[in-house]
């Protein structure tokens, strides 16, 4: 019995590969932008430690921070279509899940003090 293991390269949008010149440069570019994005999420985690803020204020500030961090990274990495419709659909998808989770927490009364 023979087992074949295939390791695929990281997925990179073909448009980004064309702009960067090759796949390695595109992957490095994505990695750098994802590092910046991770730093934004890491910095945003302190928002949840602000005990004097209520859940709505924390969520609103985090929503703005995540949007400001995520949207440019998604745009430059070609994770979204470069049009107003593409921007809007990505924005809605990006923010629908956290808002839905927040609504569920508020509806169950599990908000905390």
Image (tube, rainbow, N blue to C red):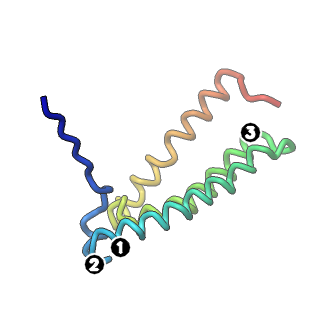
Disc 2: which residue: 21
Residue 77 % position (x, y): 39, 65
SS category of the residue bearing label 3: helix
In this image, 101 relative to 46: left or right? left
What residue would you read off at disc 3? 55
Q: Check contact, mark 2 vs mark 1: CB within 8 A.
A: yes
User: Residue 16's image quarter?
Assistant: bottom left
Q: Secondary structure at mark 1?
A: helix
Tell me if residue 69 comes above or below residue 55 in the rendering.
Answer: below
Q: Mark 1 near mark 3, Cβ–Cβ under 8 Å?
A: no
Label at residue 25: 1
Q: Position of residue 74 (x, y in %)?
A: 43, 61
Disc ID at residue 66: none
On screen, residue 25 versus residue 2, left or right, reads right
Residue at x 34%, y 67% (from the top left corner): 82
At numbered mark 2, what does the secondary structure look like: helix, strand or loop?
Answer: loop
The structure residue drawn at horizontal position 44% and vertical position 46%, both measured from the top left corner, is 93
Closer to the N terminus: mark 2 or mark 3?
2
Of residues 64 and 42, the one nearer the viewer is 42
Q: Residue at x 56, y 61 (%)?
A: 69
Looking at the rendering, which quadrant does residue 107 occupy? Answer: top right
CA–CA distance in space, label 2 to label 3: 45 Å
Q: Which quarter of the rendered picture does the N terminus lie within?
A: top left
Q: Nearer the viewer, residue 6 or 78?
A: 6
Compared to residue 55, the image places residue 24 above or below, namely: below
């Amino acid at each position: 019995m023979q087992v074949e293991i295939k390791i695929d390269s990281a997925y990179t949008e073909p448009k980004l590969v064309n702009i960067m010149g090759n796949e390695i440069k595109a992957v490095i570019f994505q990695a750098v932008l994802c590092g910046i994005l991770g730093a934004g999420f890491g910095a945003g985690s302190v928002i949840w430690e602000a005990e004097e803020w209520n859940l709505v204020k924390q969520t609103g500030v985090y929503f703005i921070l995540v949007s400001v961090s995520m949207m440019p990274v998604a745009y430059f990495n070609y994770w979204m279509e470069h049009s107003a419709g593409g921007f809007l659909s990505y924005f809605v998808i990006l923010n629908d899940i956290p808002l839905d989770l927040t609504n569920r927490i508020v509806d169950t009364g599990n908000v905390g003090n």
